[in-house]
Image (cartoon, grey):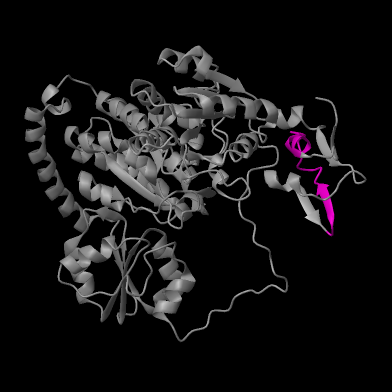
Amino acid sequence: MKEIMTGNEAIARGAYEAGCRVAAAYPGTPSTEILENIANYKEIYSQWSVNEKVAVEVAGGAAISGSRALAAMKHVGLNVASDPLFTLSYTGVNGGLVIVTADDPGLHSSQNEQDNRYYALHAKVPMLEPSDSQECLDYTKLAFELSEEYDTPVLLRTTTRVCHSKSLVTPGVRNDPGVKEYKKDAKKNCMIPAFGKLKHYVVEERLAKLREYSDRSPLNRIEWGNRKIGIITSGISYQHAREVMGDDASYLKIGFSYPLPAKLIKEFADGVDTLYVIEENDPYLETFVKSLGIKCIGKEVFPACDELNPEIIEKALKPEKTRSTYTLDVSIPARPPVLCAGCPHRGIFYALKKFKDIVVTSDIGCYSLCAMPPLDSAHTMICMGAGFSAGIGFDKAFKQAGKNTKVFGCLGDSTFFHSGITGLVDAVYNKSNIAMIVLDNRTTAMTGHQPNPGTGVTLSGEKVPPVDVVQIAKAVGVKDENIKVIDPYNLAETQAVLQKAYESDEPFVIVSKRSCALLKEVQRERANLKCKVVPEKCTKCKMCLRIGCPAISFKNGIISIDQSSCNGCTLCKQVCRFDAIERVGEE
C-alpha cells in the first residue's frame, strides 16, 4: 500500500525498517521532522541532544557498541558535529551509523548557504543523495548496509525541497539485524596518534573500494534519451531537469555522490554531444567532471546562489521557449517576517533599543528578527552560541582600544544549552563585563516547539528535572547580585534591570522568562486577554507601532488592534503616553 510522505518522514521510516535502535538530533530546519517522526517508532530510542556534536557522539557510541544508529541535523549543524565525524571516519563502526545533513539552498531558514557535499570528500566517508521520498526511504536503508559493509559512517545528504516535498512511498517491514557483539579494541576505537596513523591507511584502502562500488552502484544510473544533450545531476536538481527536458536529453543521475563514479561519468560523457552539469550551489559535480578532462557546461549558465527550479533550467537549456506563468490582478504587499503578536522577546529588544551607545551581539532563533526594523537592535548574528562569545570579543577589543562601550549578548534558552554555557564560563573566567541575556521562552520555538533541557520534558514526553539557567550561572561564578530574572512583559522592570546591567563592571546575567505566545497552554490561558484602542483618547502619535507588533495597524487614519491575534501582553499599553490602550479580559 502506497503512502504519501515527506522526505523527512520517509527517512524516519527507512531508519525504522533498517532496524535502527538509537537516534539523536538537535532540531534545525529542514531536518527537524526526522527525529519527530522517528520518535513515533517505539522500537527506536530517540532523543533531542543539546547540540549536534553530542548527537553524533551519542549515535557514534551506539554504533560502536553494536546497534544501528542515526544522527540528524541541518547543514550548519554538521559544522558543530564535524569533530566526531572526522574521527569516526577513522574508527569506523560496528553497527551501522548514518548521519543526515539537510542542506538549505536558498537560505529559507539559515544563516548561510554552505554546500555540505564537501564534508564527505574531506572526512572521506561515503555520501548518498536521494531526490524524492521513496529514495529517502530506500537510501536510508542502504546507508546502514553500506556503513556496516565498509565499516564507516555514511552521510545522507538532503536539501529543503527533498525534506519537505511529498511523494508516493511504498513502506516495507522492519528488518532488525539485532545488536552486533561488542569487543574491546583500543587500536580500532581509541584514536591516539599511534593508532590514528595506522587507521589513516585503512581509510584510504576503504576509499579505493568505495570508488569501485560507486561505478557499479545502482544509485548511479544512466537514463538514455536524446543523446544531443547529456545531463549529469543529483538530488532535487534531477527532478527539475526531468521536468524541463523529459526524453529530449539523456541523464546520469548521481545518487551515490561520494566517491563519484569516474568510469560511469566517462562512459556517459562519451555517449552525448553536449554535456551539462546541473546542481545547486557549488560546482561539486562539475569540478570533478572537469578534473577527468571532460568538457562540460555548468555554473556559467546555472547560478551558484539560491535554489534551482524548472524555470531557471529551462531558460538555460531552452531559451527560445516561453514558459507560461500565472499572473494576479492585484499587487501583493511585501510581508517581511516579524516577531509574533505577544512574543516575549519584543519587550527586551524594545528596551535595549533605548540605549544608544551599546552593542548587541545576538544569536540564532526567533529573536534573530530583532535585527529588523522597528526593533533594529542586533549588531551581529553569527552562529549558535556566538551571542555570548562574540560579545566577549567586542568587549575585550573595546577595552584594548580604550573604549567603554557596553556589550549585551543575547541568546535563547535552547541555544544556551546548545553552546551558550561555554560562552558564559568564558566571560566569568576571563573577567568580561558583558551583560548576558538568556531569552527563556520555555521551548525551542523557531523549529516548532521542541523541548530542551530547561523545559523538563524529553522528546518522548518523559518528565525530567529541568536544568536551571540561574543555578548554572551561580555555579560558574556569577555573583548572586548580578543575576536577575525578569518578565519581559513588564517593561518598567525590564528597563530597570537592563540599566543595572549597563552600569555593572562584572559579568551580568539576565534571564528573560516568559513562555512563547504560540504554545498551546499559553494560548488557552490568555485566550480572553486582549488589548484595544480607546478611540477618543488616541492621538495617532504611532508610538505603539514602534514595538513592531503585527496585531497593531494604522489604516485610514485609525490605530487598531486585531483581536484575533492579540494576547494582551500590554506592551502597547505600556508605551502609550495617553492611556489610549486598555486591556480587557481576566488573567
| Residue 494 or residue 175, whichever sits in front | 494
Residue occupying image coordinates x 54% and y 47%: 371
| Residue 3 or residue 284, whichever sits in front | 284
Residue occupying image coordinates x 19% and y 76%: 270
Decide if residue 546 is on the left or right side of residue 288: right
Q: Quadrant of residue 446?
A: top right
Could you tell me if residue 413 is visible in this image?
no
386 w.r.t. 312: above or below: above
| Residue 303 or residue 458, whichever sits in front | 303
Q: Please state the horizontal and vertical placement of residue 385, each as a whole percent of the image.
A: 41, 34
Residue occupying image coordinates x 23% and y 34%: 88
Residue occupying image coordinates x 38% and y 58%: 235
Q: Please state the horizontal and vertical placement of residue 233, each as a whole percent of the image.
A: 33, 65
The reply to whether the magenta stretch includes residue 564 is yes
| Residue 529 or residue 319, whichever sits in front | 529
Q: Please state the horizontal and vertical placement of residue 417, each as a whole percent of the image.
A: 45, 26
Q: Which residues are magenta?
A: 556-575
Q: Residue furthest bottom?
A: 320
- The number of callouts visible is 0
Q: Quadrant of residue 575?
A: top right
The reply to whether the magenta stretch includes residue 125 is no
Q: Quadrant of residue 301?
A: bottom left
Q: Residue furthest front?
A: 402
Q: Please state the horizontal and vertical placement of residue 534, each as a whole percent of the image.
A: 89, 42
352 w.r.t. 331: above or below: above
Could you tell me if residue 199 is visible in this image?
yes
Quadrant in which the C terminus appears? top right
